[in-house]
Image (cartoon, grey):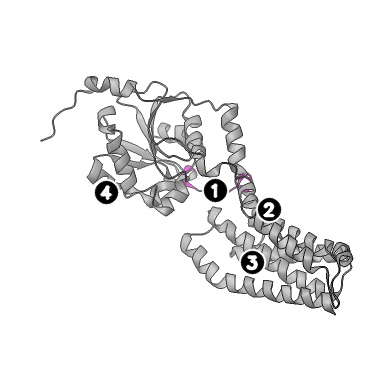
Amino acid sequence: MNLPIDFQSFKPLALSLPAVSTQLNWMDYLGAIKVRWGIGRDCYTVIPGLYKVGNPNSESDVFVSANYKLSFDALRKNLDSLNAWILVIDTKGINVWCAAGKGTFGTDNLVKSIKKTSLESIVKHRTIIVPQLGAVGVAAHIVKKQSGFRVVYGPVHAKDIKAFIQAGYKATPEIREMTFPIQERAKLIPVDMMYGKYKLLIVLFVFFVLSGLDRTGFLFAKMLETSLFPLVNIIGAYLAGIVIAPLLLPLVPFRAFTFKGAFWGVVITLVLNLLFKVPLIESIAMGLINLSLASFMTMNFTGSSTYTSLSGVKKEMKWAIPFQIAFAVVGLILFIISKLV
């Protein structure tokens, strides 16, 4: 038998909950810039729990968020002029979409968070609003069974929350659609660029040294004289895969990201061969390496994209990586040969 709850007795509990502003300050924006460049990414989190926005009461909406601060900030800044609750669940500092795929933004974690925060004592209604991108990890019927709360899936983007509410908590096809415009793709570029910076430096050093190869051994003068072409190629292919391909993603008519990157690897090769006059064998060598590197870096972007599914990514990597390795190895061998002939 369920006894009625006297919500007045729980008023001190609600009053003790932390309140958050819907206005982001300069520290929030600075933190966002830093994390975009991979600075402090592993600790950019919010303490899990229940937060107040405005002056919510027992009838106010409850929105669910990951504890990745960018996700949390995107939600709270779009709740301005509203009185609401934000239930932050522990996703280990991962955003909603990725956490849903990994299972941390999932059914069990959500149910635990509901019970841990005594949400049933804070609100009279039994409804929580989960971001649509978290739907893959949340089984609504199990949440209902284990916690008593009904899950309503909100819009894809937090900016559409008010329209969602005004429409009677129903999402139109427009706000259900997951778009991936150029500005969203651009935001992801710094993270990918910084992620591989040390590997890039190692590759650049290796080719700088190999440029000094000669039939008589290593010549430092030759290293300085001939290293510019391979180093520019490698940097160009790296930027082609991380910057050019993501920005111009829809313009290249290949479904596989591997081919999208390979396309720009070829473009970079042709452009640089017009600017530099080098032996044919070295040109071919760097062309193969460019194709492999640009292809690989763009393929990595599939994890950030809405264009492919997890199964699609795994399927592509299975056949693409052997080709990328083969092209890189052949290119490296040809580059060494070009220095010895």
**Mark 4 — residue?**
142
Asked whether 81 or 146 is in front, the reply is 146
Q: Secondary structure at mark 4?
A: helix
Query: Is residue 117 part of the magenta span, yes or no?
Result: no
First reached walking from the N terminus: tag 2 or tag 3: 2
First reached walking from the N terminus: tag 4 or tag 3: 4
**Mark 3 — residue?**
259
Instruction: Please identify the dominant SS of the magenta region.
Output: helix
Q: Is 197 placed above or below 88 here?
A: below
Q: Are marks 2 and 3 in contact (CB under 8 Å)?
A: no
Magenta segment: 175-187
What percent of the width, then of the height, locates residue 90?
39, 42
How crowded pointer 3 is (Cα within 10 Å; few <14, some 14-19, many 20+) is rated as many
**Mark 1 — residue?**
179
What percent of the width, then of the height, locates residue 266?
74, 66
In the rendered image, the residue lying farthest to the left is: 1
- In the rendered structure, find residue 243 and report the number of the disc placed on it: 2
Mark 1 and mark 3: Cα distance apart in space: 22 Å
Kind of residue indicated by mark 4:
Ile
Left or right placement of residue 217 versus residue 234 in this view? right
Query: Is residue 182 part of the magenta span, yes or no?
Result: yes
First reached walking from the N terminus: tag 2 or tag 4: 4
Asked whether 56 or 330 is in front, the reply is 330
Kind of residue indicated by mark 3:
Phe
First reached walking from the N terminus: tag 1 or tag 4: 4
Left or right placement of residue 213 versus residue 79 in this view? right
Kind of residue indicated by mark 1:
Thr
State the residue at coordinates (52%, 44%).
42
Kind of residue indicated by mark 2:
Val
Closer to viewer: mark 1 or mark 3 = 3
Q: Quadrant of residue 271?
A: bottom right
